[in-house]
Image (cartoon, helix red, strand yellow):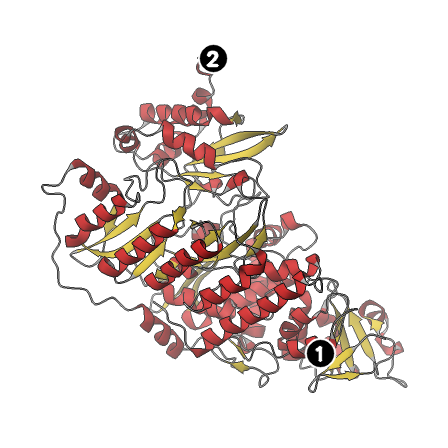
Amino acid sequence: MRKILRLPEAALVEDTAGELVSQADYLKDPARHSAGDHPLGVRAVPADKVEDLSPYLGRLALVAIEFPGPGEGRGYTYARLLRQRYGFKGEIRAVGPGVKQDLLFFMFRCGFDAFELAEHENLAEARAALHRFTLAYQPAVPRAAVQEARFTAAG
Amino acid sequence: MYHYDSTDQTLVDQRVAEFRDQTRRFLAGELSEDDFRPLRLRNGLYIQRFAPMLRIAIPYGLLNSTQLRMLASIARRYDRSYGHFTTRQNLQLNWPKLAEVPDILADLATVQMHAIQTSGNCVRNVTSDHLAGVTADEIEDPRPYCELLRQWSSFHPEFTYLPRKFKIAVSGAPADRAATEVHDIGLHLVRNAHGELGFEVLVGGGLGRAPMIGQVIRDFLPMGDLLTYTEAILRVYNRHGRRDNIHKARIKFLVKALGIATFREQVEAEWLDSRAFGSQLTQAQVTHVRGFFQPHPYASLIDLDPTVNAGADFKAWYRYNTRAHKVSGYRVVFVSLKPLGAPPGDMSSEQMEAVAQLADEVSFGEIRVTHTQNLVLAEVPQTELVKTWRELKRLGLATPNIGTLTDMIVCPGLDFCSLANAGTISVANQLQRHFDDYDYLYDIGEIELKMSGCMNACGHHHVGHIGILGVDKHGEEWYQITIGGSAREASSLGHVIGPSVPQEEVAAIVGRILDVYRELRHEDERFIDTVRRVSATPFKERVYAKDLAAA
């Protein structure tokens, strides 16, 4: 089983979401998927348009966003959109082979609150990576988590 | 100039610690080459043909003497006692050792410097006008806005893994000395009808394989929205820029594919939705940062003519290597890094230290780097010009060629770069030897020659009045010549005037181009103006004419 770190404590948790439905499958017939025994989760890949999920976010406990490799950056924007534009309060989990310690701080700042670590990732180092920087210039999503030292958001 | 506060220093120090740990993990085999590459690139570290190359950020080209001394010391301690200034106003070290790079970054941090985001697919060092703050034609000093952009773009959580690199240039004057029209975003400080300060915003310019001139996306952006609007552009690009083909990934391809009107609609819609969550820029912040760029405590001096009773050497240097300063009694001095026989843009540790000393003595301790790969002492009292000239001459930094043919922009080329197809430094030396007659150079007058060793165009050849591009032809180094390019206001891209030529013929071909110019020019007409007036056709017809080629 993959290791999942979940904020706020960065605790190692079991995957409670069960099977994730791909965004493409989910959107074919959203009514067919219901929470059932497990909280319902959708898995988006970089090419998905995350705003297509917006009508259904109230039914979702979890949106997982895939990071296939080190250079893929669309997921950062998707998490911010989910949190800020669509007010999603559920879990946003970074998944895929690109979820490695050196990217966690940026993911966390964009609104991810759970991280399914890639294979061979060191758990202690990954936890520490969430605190690598104590300050940031820009406003981001978890407003109180890191001191926004310069620019702040109006919203 | 800007001074770090505890926030800036803490972030840079934490970044050094992070990169030290990343380097350790890489060297211990815990981090793969594929995973390490984007991390080292975001700290300016390339793996080149012979050694790593480290690109150190010089934000908008501004240094103080302490920083220049540290660069000299780093080059001496960790490299071969020289560095190379680039078209992005940065400094590159060609021979550092990977294991020592964290120590170099730590040394830089002690003088408020870094190598953050000097490469990689992220927002790069923001560049600007090397005459900022001292030129009479300026609407407003652009450097405070460069500094605000530097801070905002550093470790931006959403935009550090873009489809491709992203370059921003800011100009505060109508005369564009920062090549803003060939940047991903070009910002021009302007005032609107109410006298309020803001920006004209250009997007989608760039050089490389498919050069394009930026287009206006917004005539007037209010100051407070500088960062929120930039974020909206970057968000549209981050989502929709191509990631499947590295050669089509710059924002210019997205702008071209959508058309500027559609791209603008998308950005404006994104901006409306996101600006409340974005980085707001308050008047207090602007005022605070502008406070760092206030005029120096100038003495009350009157303008002199320092060439009275001076020798011909000094007169030539004064005419070509100095420029007007907006304050009477002062002069802008160029430090030429284009001497005969040395790679353009290179500078030794000894030269850096001596120029730092000179800056302390005559120019308020500040030094600027130009995108044409020279340095500038921007605030020299005219009474100190003779002394300054003597010292620069002693250092080999007073070649009186600024703005002339031999003041060329040249990338490092095949001698250093793993991307290059052809050498550039040897061709630069060939040109310097061929055109070593100052009467001839001065007769040719103002001209910009720019040379790149490959399509990536680090030497800006597309926007050279004369552009030279190195190409690989069956394993040999050949050169394609263009004319008519310019990165000044009303930018233009050069036209190819004929087949590529072998290395040994480059200077002769450039000579023929200049012969045609001398024949066709009107009195006092610059090369670029002649080309624009008569088009490239006469040059095409005559430079490659058979009788000439056979001669």
Camera-side residue of B78 and A19: B78
Camera-side residue of A35 and B513: B513
* Residue B359 x %, y %: 27, 58
Camera-side residue of B32 and B98: B98
Quarter of the figure that contains the N terminus of chain B? bottom left
The residue beneath circle 1 is A124
* B457 with respect to A7 (left or right): left
Q: Amino acid at mark 2?
A: Ala
* B515 with respect to A10 (left or right): left
The residue beneath circle 2 is B550
* Residue B463 x %, y %: 45, 42
Give the quadrant of residue B147. Answer: bottom left
Q: Identify which residue is drawn at 29% across, 33% down.
A: B525
Give the quadrant of residue B315. Answer: top left
Indicate whether B545 appears above or below A80.
Answer: above
Q: Amino acid at mark 1?
A: Ala
Give the structural element (helix, strand or loop) at label 1.
helix
Quarter of the figure that contains the C terminus of chain B? top left
Q: Identify which residue is drawn at 36% across, 55% down.
A: B129
- Residue B297 in sight from this viewpoint: yes
Instruction: For label 1, count other residues whose C-alpha is less than 10 Å away and answer few (under 14), some (14-19) or many (20+).
Output: few
Residue furthest front as drawn: B77
Camera-side residue of B179 and B195: B179
